[in-house]
Image (cartoon, coloured by chain):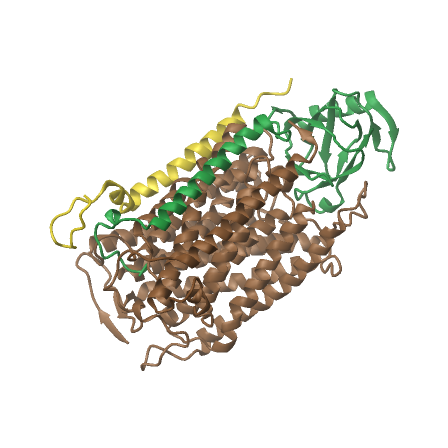
Chain colours: A yellow, B brown, C green
Amino acid sequence: MSDKPEPEARPERVPAMQQLLDNPFLLLFIGITIPTVLYIVWGVMEIASIPVAP
Amino acid sequence: MTAIDASYPGSRLAAVFRTCRFTGLKVDIAAQRLIKANAVAAVIFLAVGGLMGLLVALTRWPAVHLLPSEWFYLVLTGHGANVLLFWIIFFEIALLYFASAVLLGSRLAAPRIAWTAFGLMVVGAIMTNVAVFQGDSSVMFTSYPPMQAAPQFYLGLILFAVGALLGVGIFFGTLVIAHAEHTYEGSIPLVTFGALTAAIIAVFTLASGAIILVPTFLWSLGLVAEIDPLMYKVVWWGMGHSSQQINVAAHVSVWYAIGALTIGAKPLSEKVSRTAFLLYILFLQLASAHHLLADPGMSATWKIVNTSYLMYLAVLGSLIHGLTVPGALEAAQRRNGYTKGAFEWLRKAPWGNPAFAGMFLSLVMFGFIGGISGVVLGTEQLNLLMHNTIYVPGHFHGTVVAGTTLAFMAMTYYVLPLIFQRDIIWPKLARWQPYLFGLGAGGISLFMMGAGTLGIPRRHWDITLTDAMHPFDLPSGGFLMMGLNGLAAVIASAGGILYILITVGTVLWGKRLDKGDAPLAFPLHKQAATVAEYGSHATVKLPGTIILVSVFFLSFVLYYFVNWKYLSEIWLLR
Amino acid sequence: MAISPPRNRLWWNEPIERVEVGWIVVAFLWGLFMFVFMIAWHFIGGQNLSTETYRVTPAAYEEKVTAFAEKYQVGEEAGGVPVVRPPAGEDVYLLARLWEWWPVLELKKGQSYRIHLSSLDWQHGFSLQPVNINISIHPGYEQIITLTPTQAGDFGIACNEYCGIGHHLMTGRIRVVE
């Protein structure tokens, strides 16, 4: 994939990373999932696991 | 100007287009109307919120101390909501419609729903303002429970968020339509990709807002017994901080767009610039945890993972843009013939064009002031030094005012001629506007950061503490800084008022550009009209950019360690 | 232009400028350093905010603070606020309420104390000045930090979390003796 074909020259295989960047809904999915899991869900679990004062 | 009627098979409503004679872009008239409406609403809320900001700064200027305490807290609440939320998000919705429909030459998805969204946002914004002015909702922008505002305060914010979410949905819908109807070839433009980044962050932002504000609204009605203050804070900041991350993605896109429009800049590398945006999509929203570094209950692991944006990868994104944006500008200027020495490209840049000047000032100040202070403030332990001091507003005025607002103002100088089709009135005054506003905005950021470093608290009406039960003296240097902050706020307000006057004047009385072939007061670069030549920039040397970035990096490292030194000298705590 | 689609369909395969690669490497390493340093400070640094926290009702917390203040009271400040001198190493209780920090504490320089912090009503911001230690205080949560004063003198506590109309009146005091 190192050669640079002219546009419309032949059917090209789009590199995987470019396919990801060209797919808004996949990006939307991971862009929502990561902060929801790492920040909100994990954060709420931290709060829920605070023990009652002795 | 020619209007082209075109109807698409499968679409119920025939979209009407015109072709822009400056850029060659095909503009959907429905999108154009919506962009205008959202931009006008944005400017109105900027005027209201900006005025409130001036009143706040004049009250915190110890020698002036303008407002009585009740009014101070009321106006401060309104200032936050109007500028941090309403001005910015209205403008961003306009940008999203522009980056999707206009840049892709597509019709806007569901204009009727877009108008509903606009209506909801306007009603919500007005409702929250009314609640604030009724006087029993002086709870600050953050509205932390158990402090309670009137129900209409929360309801207004919810309506606004739902409207904005609909607007973001329209953006995604337009991407789908443009792709399906093949209005463009290959990948979306970089600026649209930046807008997509902003839109993705906006979905998380507005969803977090809805999740926490709906129960809080019910609580204010007495239908829910209690809102856990810590839980509220975690979820609320999913909205509160992420909404500022929408700004970052949006104004970085604006930088690229203005670079293209004014000097014909193209990204050094599509791959690098888009990957930097991808890092935003993945990690930027974790920075919400910066607000919980000094709070009980959250483990150090959660804090470190989130506040480091998972190993500072989103900061890496910003640092990349910090090179690629000036790099693209330098490369373009060298191609334009300014090749002497390291800095001829910068000296001979179009400094008289307010769009370029505003963009460049925004870039520099966002990086040096907002960016560096943000990383320092967001470091788990260093946060102890500045948490909730006025350093925090200092930081976010560096990002949101000197960065985002200035970039959006700069963009306005092209929104007006290209979308409103009115030429800028008073171009000589307009030339000075970004400098005036930038000087003021940079000043308020730096002076508030200085005062905060000396321990001056934020959202505080009387730092003399004379009526308090245990009065003590805050450092006199802090008082001086707050005075200078007031002065800078006056300068920024002058720039802000000038912006409002020029914008309103242009919309009402600017020379019409839709008829005849009059040139623009601030011309576009010739390449802005020719989309043929495009791709990553060819190999170039960028000595100027390398010097600028090195200076930035050294300042960053130095400031970072100065703060650790400072931290190591305070009382021991574990 | 950044405002039109990339001309090269496979832009991902275009080579990257050397200056860009260089900067990405530097920036990535710097980020990695900052990440590691934040973790390292937990081991090498003397200033880390404890995360020891318990749920507590405001009423129960008020009881604890009152009992503590009665036990170790040594004097009274203007306004009838007790001055409390706990023995070194002891559990120390400080409460935040509209609009004061209660009671006044007298600590010994160089000694460590387990300081309990909570609010009886709204959120407050513990801001020790001029030392500049700033911590958020929530109602319903009792946070315990181990604090060792390293300077003697009178220190003020301001509130830096907005807590209503008397926010700017809310102060407290910690006295550190040699």
Quadrant of the snapshot with the C terminus of chain B: top right
Q: Position of residue B69 (x, y in %)?
A: 72, 53
Which residue is rendered at x = 53% and y = 53% of the image? B368
Q: Is residue B60 visible?
A: no
**Up/down of B397 relative to B346, above or below:** above
In the image: residue B473, left or right of residue B87: right
Which image quadrant is residue B328 in? bottom left
As rendered, which of C98 and A21 lies closer to the eye? Answer: A21
The answer to whether residue C47 is visible is yes
Query: How far across and how far down the image is residue B17, in percent?
Result: 26, 68
Residue farthest to the front, as pictured: B341
- The image shows a total of numbered marks equal to 0
Residue B230 as seen in the image, left or right of residue B92: right
Instruction: Classify B498 as above or below B390.
Output: below
Q: Nearer the viewer, residue B573 or B419?
A: B573
- Quick one: which residue is furthest to the left in this view? A10
Q: Is residue B154 left or right of residue B507?
A: right
User: In the rendered image, which quarter is residue B541 located in?
Assistant: bottom left
Give the left or right position of residue C77, taking residue B310 as reference. right
Q: Is residue B512 above or below residue B56?
A: below
The picture places residue B402, in percent across and down from the top left corner, at 53, 58
Residue B557 location in percent, x, y?
54, 44
What residue is at 38 percent from the left and 62 percent from the top?
B259
Image point 17% across, 59% down: which residue? Answer: B9
Q: Nearer the viewer, residue B385 or C65?
A: B385
Pick whichever, C77 or B287, lies toward us: B287
Quarter of the figure with the N terminus of chain B? bottom left
